[in-house]
Image (cartoon, rainbow, N blue to C red):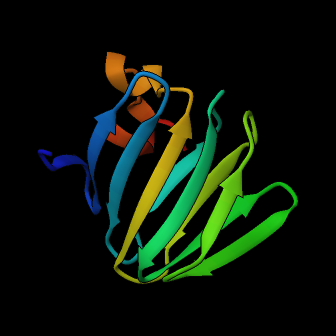
Amino acid sequence: MEREEMSEGIARQVIHSERMTTARIYLAKGSVVPRHSHDNEQLSHVLEGRLRFEFDAGPVEASAGQVVEIPSHVPHRVVALEDSLAMDIFAPVRADWLSGDDAYLRNPQATE
């Protein structure tokens, strides 16, 4: 899988199957995935480092080996507390990623 540089400090490797999207997400310390939501259910398995997931109900920190479940349509933001690698699994397929309609990752300043 080709590594795609999304914005400064954020890159991904993605594979889409018929019903799901799986991505390795690389986040440099201090990088931020801006607040967003999506129709997809998401499991984010932190493989390396430490991430803070910010929800309306409060933050959740996850370290290597931990998994965070994000239900469909729940707004969230992610901050890399350390250089981190996560494996994200989405169902259904991330149609916005397939179409390139993922500006929140490509130009995060435009969405903050």
**Residue placed at 29% from the left, 42% from the top?**
14
Q: Is residue 4 above or below residue 27?
A: above
Query: Which quadrant would the N terminus be assigned to in this image?
Result: top left
Q: Is 12 in front, or is 5?
A: 12
- In the rendered image, the residue lying farthest to the left is 2
Across and down, in percent, residue 48 comes to 39, 80
The answer to whether residue 100 is seen in the rendering is: no
In-image side of 79 versus 109 (left or right): right
Q: Tell me what residue is drawn at x 45 percent, y 19 percent.
A: 95
**Does the image show residue 16?**
yes
Q: Nearer the viewer, residue 99 or 112?
A: 99
Image-based side of 77 in relation to 58, left or right: left
Frontmost residue, 95 versus 53: 95
Is 11 placed above or below 100 here?
below
Image quadrant assignment for residue 78: bottom right
The picture quadrant where one finds residue 31 is bottom left
Q: Residue 43, position in %: x, y?
A: 59, 53
What residue lies at 34% left-to-right and 16% top-to-bottom?
A: 99
- Position of 65 relative to 77 (above/below): below
- Residue lying at the far right of the rendered structure: 57
Q: Nearer the viewer, residue 25 or 106?
A: 25
Residue at 59% over, 77% down = 66
x and y percent of residue 75 in the render?
72, 43
**Count the marks: how many?**
0
